[in-house]
Amino acid sequence: MLRKLIFFLFPLFLVQCEKTLPLPFGAEMRKIPVDSASNGKIDSMGYYIPESENYRILYIEIDKDGNGSSDEFIWQGVATLQDPKSPVKNMQKVHEQVDENNDGKIDLIRWLLPNEIIAMVQKDSDRDGYFESVFYYNLKKKVVRRELDPNKKGKPSIFIFFDRAEIDSDEDGYPDLVVYGKSELELEEKAVNKRETKPLKKEDSLLLNPSKLPQTERPLLGSGMI
């Protein structure tokens, strides 16, 4: 659906000349409805700012299941040129909000880098409106660290890696307990229930010493890779 939406919005598609000035403060934002499925129903809405030789798409909302309620929201960021000689720039997604279960509430947020590389995902797993899980990704779009805030204190206290979970039991910002396991579910259960925990020194913590992680298990954010 997003590919079709891009096709319909192409006339508004970040067409800029190299000497175009930035958009003025308070510029008017307009919207264009799109029937991307060609079934006679509006399922997408593109929001853009028009300027002389400059159309900047800022935001897209999509009704993916056609129930009349938006369930995906996409924010656009700075785009890069496909061809240095061409004035046409690509859309660059930087932020997505998704209503995965179509209950009218956002329960998943993706933060993206260029080329749609996922850097981080926030998730409200129990659909209570609080994002208690944060997932950190590597370059291959693999989750390499998950952080949990099970007590909803506003900061994580459990940090799950590929073979261990570190626990900040006194919530001072430093993990002091560790559990080991073979799966994410096992690690989460042990960490939440503080089962089979062992003391953890600061110098042995993977969270505090990310250089101890194999390169393939290091997240993009905080690793020095970006």
Image: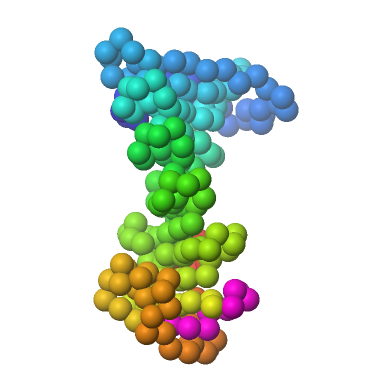
Q: State left or right for residue 16 relative to residue 137.
A: right
Is residue 176 rendered magenta in the image? Answer: yes
Q: Which quadrant, please, contains the N terminus?
A: top left
How was the colour assigned to the protein in this rendering?
A: rainbow
Viewer can see residue 137: yes
Residue situated furthest top in the rendering: 40
Whether residue 123 is situated above or below residue 225 in the rendered picture? above
Whether 56 is among the magenta residues is: no
Residue drawn at point x = 48 percent, y = 83 percent: 177
Q: Position of residue 116 (x, y in %)?
A: 40, 46
In x, y percent, where is residue 125?
40, 52
- Of 137 and 101, the residue lying toward us: 101
Give the residues drawn in magenta, as a range: 170-179
Which residue corresponds to the image point at 36% horizontal and 40% vertical from the top-left? 100
Q: Is residue 26 above or below residue 205?
A: above
Residue 42, given in percent of the width and then of the height, sits at: 38, 15
User: On the rendered structure, is 1 left or right of 134?
Assistant: left
Closest to the observer, 131 or 85: 131
Q: Quadrant of residue 102?
A: top left
Residue at the image position 42 percent from the left and 24 percent from the top: 69
